[in-house]
Amino acid sequence: MKLADFFQLLKMGNPSKPLIAAALFLGLLETGAGLVVPLLTKNLIDQLSDGGIDWTIIVFLLSAFLFQTVAGGFSFYSMTYVGENIVARLRENLWSRVLDLPVSYFDKHESGETMSRIIQDTNMVKMLVTNHFVAFLSGIVSIVGSVIILLIIDWQITLIMFLSVPLALLAILPLGKIIYKIAMQSQDEMAAFSGHLGRVLHEIRLVKAYNAQPAEEMEGKEEIRRLLRFGLKEAKILAVVSPFMTMLIMLVVVVIIGYGGARVASGAMSPGSLVAIIIYLFQIVMPFSQFASFFTTFQKTMGATERIVEMMKMKGEVGGGKKEIDFGKPLAFHNVSFAYEEGKMALKAVDFTAEPGKTVAFVGPSGGGKTTIFSLIERFYKPTEGMITIGGENIEAFDLHSWRGAIGYVSQESPIISGTIRENICYGIEKPVPEEKVKEAARLANASEFIEKLPQGYDTEVGERGVKLSGGQRQRIAIARALLRDPKLLLLDEATSNLDSESEGLVQEALKNLMKGRTTFIIAHRLSTVVDADTIIVIEDGRVTGQGTHEDLLAAHALYQKLVKQQFKMK
Ligand code: ADP
Ligand code: MG
């Protein structure tokens, strides 16, 4: 099952078959040359002890070494080439897959987890292909070849050697299983640890502001100690296995040299044979030690394969049809219900109509479902029941790319990506944008003044590694970004609620420019910003409990009256 999946993945990487064949062939040649070397050594020694020397043997021996080295190098490069290409294709595939996954996926999975699939799990596949595949096959050839030649040279000594095999297996098999289990656990622990470090470092200001360093230090120390314990457990087992294996090998060598030496002395065996036997012994032992790591990598790769395939199978966002969207028609929610998680309704039978070019405002207690309405309009999620239409047509019928392209979203926490101010304003626009257009958008967004004061103007780096922008500045960049796309629908989610009154004035003005002539949905904490809306909709606990103009609601809606009263008292 998993193995089939693994080959499926390899196929997806579209590896070059001739190259794999070449790598295998060269790998086998390398091993073959390795098998010839002891035989040549044997002849050389036997000739030397007979007093003569045939130079052709030395030439052969040197050629065999050279051949082994060159074939090994080419084989390694070809296999690495194949492996690297497979991992690159897999990563390309996964990355476009991940970007296409619906928002609900990202609600459920930590970004660290997704990252480790793209980076680490694909790397496991490469490791198996590059470092272990050829080594495993040539290891088997080396062992089988050595054993056959040994049996021909001296079957008695070969049998003595074989006596040690069951002993070695007796020690390796059970302990190997334990080591494998520990390796798996410590891998999980390592993933958890790095995830935790990432979260703490990301929120370092919170950590410091709330004096949480000691607590975080403790927690980190505990995780580090757990990792230490796993490391030591593994070391304990290795401390038994490794010396045992060394001892076993030494024992075999001693027995062979002792027994073989006696046979050489009695003339039953040539000294060259004895040397060859010892070299073959090592050619059997060395691949064995590689097998252990092959099987561990193999198991890990099967785990990684399972995770990669699981991700490949996930459904991406549905693109919708190619129908032309008519934003001149009203957008309406028809009894829309929605649940993020089963059984917990965030929206219940929401029903409203927004006329084109008008402004619809949403007010109500936080957690009521206002942002959820925006997410549904953006088609981040699909309604659980009911539907959203424009001009009577279900919005799912339109191409997702064009749909989102027609929406401008400005939220409370306007995201800034790493890059220049210009890149931030032009974010997501595929064609190059003329300079005047960028400047015009910034001017209408009330942002050009502060941008031009920055050291490099529009080329100033902002975001994680650049200049930190204030809340109001970020907001105005976001508005410029929205303006540049010339959206048909505007979604403003508490776009001014985080700002001081001076920035708020600037942002309000910018928003007015942005809203001109567009259908606008606005969520506002401050009622002063929504009193002019054409329709105000009150959302409480996922339901629409009132809609109308400010005057309508002030006359008839209890919660709205209360909100108005509270805000007037505050001022
Ligand atoms: P508002 O914007 O009115 O404050 P939201 O639409 O953000 O309210 O949230 C409505 C309800 O949905 C809340 O109970 C909130 O906890 C829940 N919710 C919001 N986003 C998610 C999410 N991504 N996953 C699960 N529940 C969510
Ligand atoms: Mg909200």
Image (cartoon, helix red, strand yellow):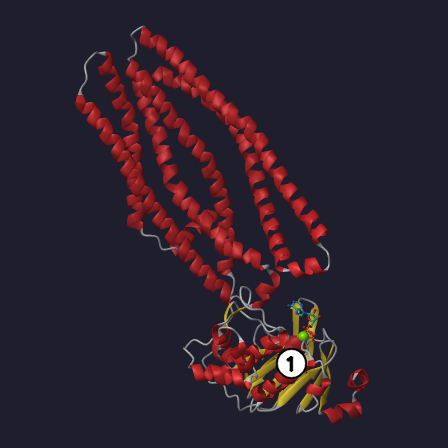
The quarter of the displayed image where residue 562 is located:
bottom right
Residue 134's x, y, as percent? 36, 40
Q: Residue at x 62, y 83 (%)?
A: 507
Q: Is residue 1 visible?
A: no
| Left/right of residue 220 with respect to residue 396 in the rendered view | right
Q: Residue most toward the top?
A: 266
Task: Give SS at disc 1.
Answer: helix
Seen in the picture, residue 131 relative to 351 is either above or below; the reply is above
Ligand 1: quadrant of the figure: bottom right
Amino acid of disc 1 = Ser
Q: Which residue is mark 1?
A: 503
Q: Residue at x 40, y 46 (%)?
A: 129
Q: Residue at x 25, y 34 (%)?
A: 66
Seen in the picture, residue 320 relative to 86 is either above or below; the reply is below
Residue 448's x, y, as percent? 53, 82
Q: Quadrant of the C terminus?
A: bottom right
The quarter of the displayed image where residue 552 is located:
bottom right
Residue 108's x, y, as percent? 61, 61
Residue 546's x, y, as percent? 74, 86
The quarter of the displayed image where residue 70 is located:
top left
| Left/right of residue 261 with respect to residue 115 in the rendered view | left
Front one among 137 and 397: 137
Seen in the picture, residue 94 relative to 560 is either above or below; the reply is above
Q: Is residue 165 visible?
A: yes
Seen in the picture, residue 255 relative to 408 is either above or below; the reply is above
Q: Is mark 1 within 8 Å of ligand 2?
A: no
Q: Residue at x 46, y 50 (%)?
A: 123
